[in-house]
Image (tube, grey):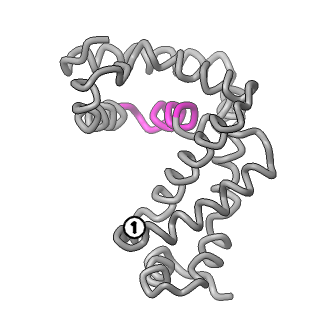
Amino acid sequence: MKALDDNGIVELYLQRDETAIKHTAEKYGSRLRAVSYNIVSDSLTAEECENDTYMEAWKRIPPHEPRTYLYAFLARITRNISLNRCREQSALKRSAFVGELSAELEQCIPAPDDIECRITDEELRLAINGFLGKLDEEKRNIFIRRYWYMDSVSDISKRFAMSESKVKTTLFRCRNRLRDYLEKEGYDL
């Protein structure tokens, strides 16, 4: 099977051609499984989440046409499916890890406990993206690997060839900067 670019894969989805799933799995399967595994800590469940991602992509394309951001589109679906699976299975060990990450960020991001906060979700997303855009590439990548991909400090340290203490310090400082940034943007934390 000839490897297709993202535009070609999306075109197959739009034509309702089932080979789109094969091409997607060939190009992104291992990366999507890794995203899921970081959340569910079980290879079989991660594989199920990967397969569920293909089915969800089939349902969402159209109306979406993620020609220029197919991997990000798929990774977001995988992440949400994996988090839901984790909640459903009450995987205590991984839930504790997710709880740990939540605790790290709860000092920086307002909790969506009221209507007003839910209404400003889009504004908050834009504010966080603005903050991330101001970080240098290394710090931004460390922050995203930890809080989006849910990589462990150890994995991040290996990925970026730095000590675990430097990763922890970088994350601590980024969280503090994010809190300050959001307070300046008018968020009560």
The quarter of the picture where residue 108 lies is top left
Q: Say if the magenta span includes residue 146.
A: yes
Q: How many marks?
A: 1
- Is residue 178 in view from this perspective? no
Query: Where in the figure is residue 29, as x and y percent of width and height?
Result: 67, 63
Nearer to us in this view, 55 or 106? 55
Q: Quadrant of residue 184?
A: top left
Residue 67 or residue 55, whichever sits in front: 55
Give the residue at x 38% y 73%: 62
State whether the magenta stretch is mostly helix, strand or loop.
Answer: helix
Quarter of the figure that contains the C terminus: top left
Name the side, left or right, on which 24 lies relative to 62.
Answer: right
Dot 1 crowding, Cα within 10 Å, few <14, some 14–19, many 20+: some
Secondary structure at badge 1 equals loop
Does residue 20 lie above or below 141 as drawn? Answer: below
- Disc 1 residue type? Pro
Whether residue 99 appears in this view of the structure is yes
Residue 23, above or below 153: below
* x 42%, y 71%: residue: 61
Q: Nearer the viewer, residue 3 or 161?
A: 3
Left or right for 171, reference 44: left
Q: Is residue 153 above or below residue 79?
A: above
Percent across and percent down for residue 6 are 48, 74
- Pointer 1 residue: 66
Work out which quarter of the rendered image holds the N terminus and state it: bottom right
180 shown above or below 140: above
**In front here: 38 or 48?**
48
- At horizontal 63% and vertical 60% (from top left) the residue drawn is 52
Residue pictured at 71% horizontal, 29% vertical: 94
The answer to whether residue 35 is magenta is no
- What is the magenta range? 135-147
Spot occupied by residue 8 in the image (x, y as percentages of width and height) = 47, 82
